[in-house]
Image (cartoon, rainbow, N blue to C red):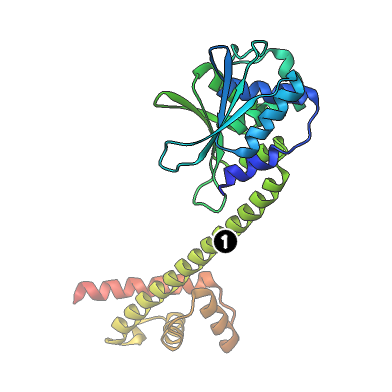
């Protein structure tokens, strides 16, 4: 079962009051209902969602919809649940709801839940990218949904996709916030567990990569210093000053250590404090001398 189906199954079972039912059903009708021969048709691939719609219509309008189950003609051959409602009193003409339907926070949350049930999909957080989207037919309605989402600072955006409009959210934390908004709390816990694990894993990988890069840099630096010292040694290390000779001899003895480690070793063994910066400047003089010798060769 997809993560989208899991979320829809969860929110389809929520207990809500009549005001929330009106908002949720209004969103469902706006996103999926078709009127043919005075019959309203609503189609979904999710059995739990079809039961939700059935109960909403029955509770609010005291009408018993007919449910027809068919095999989809698509390659996945999933079942389609088609609800037929024979009642002209249900208004499906307005895409954007009247203000009173979404006049408080709970109604807006219920409306967004209804939109998700009909036109929403969400990637499993285990996949390579975080993504939540709603696919709708009407541009004006797309921006209406976008505005509702951004009342909660979800940073959603609208994108034209062929003949439809996609409202999408890419940020993991914002997607988790949306799941809280529609009261999908089990999904939130799952999503957060996976997100935190992935973030921790990514951080560990970055730290490992950084550490490896530092090791590579230490090896590369030490290798150049050794080549410079060996070149000077062909003529004689006495070309160097006393301080540079000490550093050169210690580098020949400790070939793989970093400048910081070398400064600590020299300070401990000679009893004379030398900093990493001091080591760096002495190697700089060694490098300048090696460059001069290369020019004469």
Seen from the viewer's position, the closer of residues 239 and 49 is 49
In-image side of 26 versus 119 (left or right): right
* Image point (54%, 78%), residue name: 261
Residue to which mark 1 is pinned: 201
> In the rendered image, is residue 282 in sight?
yes
Kind of element beneath mark 1: helix
Is 38 placed above or below 285 here? above
Height in image: 182 above or below 204? above
Percent position of residue 67, x then y: 61, 29
- Residue 119: which quarter of the image? top right
The relative height of residue 185 versus residue 140 in the rendered view (above or below) is below
Residue visible at 43% across and 69% down in the picture? 217
Q: Residue 123: percent from the left, percent from the top?
A: 54, 45
Q: Residues within 10 Å of mark 1 (few under 14, many from 20)?
A: few
Q: State the image coordinates of residue 53 (x, y, percent, origin top left).
A: 66, 29
Q: Examine the image and state in which quarter residue 94 appears.
A: top right
In the image, residue 173 above or below residue 21:
below
> Which residue is painted at 66% across and 51% down in the image?
192
- The one nearer the camera, 213 or 74, is 74
The C terminus: image quadrant: bottom left
The residue positioned farthest toward the left in the image shown: 297
Q: Return the x and y of residue 194 as percentages of the image width and height.
A: 62, 55
Q: Nearer the viewer, residue 186 or 69?
A: 69
């Amino acid at each position: 079962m997809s993560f989208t189906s899991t979320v829809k199954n969860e929110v389809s079972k929520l207990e809500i009051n009549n005001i929330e039912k009106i908002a949720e059903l209004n969103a469902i009708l706006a996103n999926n209902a078709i009127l043919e021969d005075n019959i309203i048709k609503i189609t979904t691939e999710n059995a739990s969602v079809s039961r939700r719609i059935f109960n909403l219509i029955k509770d609010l309008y005291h009408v018993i919809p007919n449910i027809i189950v068919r095999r989809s003609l698509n390659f996945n051959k999933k079942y389609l649940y088609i609800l037929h409602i024979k009642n002209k009193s249900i208004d499906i003409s307005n895409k954007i709801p009247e203000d009173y339907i979404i006049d408080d926070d709970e109604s807006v949350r219920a409306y967004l839940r209804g939109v998700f049930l009909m036109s929403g999909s969400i990637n499993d957080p285990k996949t390579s990218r975080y993504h939540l989207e709603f696919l709708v037919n009407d541009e004006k309605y797309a921006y209406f949904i976008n505005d509702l989402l951004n009342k909660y600072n979800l940073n959603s955006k609208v994108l034209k996709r062929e003949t439809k409009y996609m409202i999408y959210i890419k940020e993991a934390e914002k997607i988790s916030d949306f799941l809280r908004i529609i009261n999908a709390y089990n999904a939130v816990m799952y999503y957060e567990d996976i997100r935190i694990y992935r973030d921790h894993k990514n951080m560990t990988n970055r730290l490992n990569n950084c550490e490896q890069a530092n090791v590579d840099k230490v090896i590369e630096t030490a290798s150049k210093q050794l080549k410079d010292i060996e070149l000077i040694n062909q003529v004689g290390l006495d070309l160097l000053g006393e301080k540079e000779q000490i550093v050169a001899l210690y580098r020949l003895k400790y070939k793989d250590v970093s400048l910081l480690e070398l400064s600590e070793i020299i300070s401990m063994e000679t009893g004379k404090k030398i900093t990493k910066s001091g080591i760096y400047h002495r190697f700089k003089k060694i490098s300048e001398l090696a460059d001069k010798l290369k020019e004469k060769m």
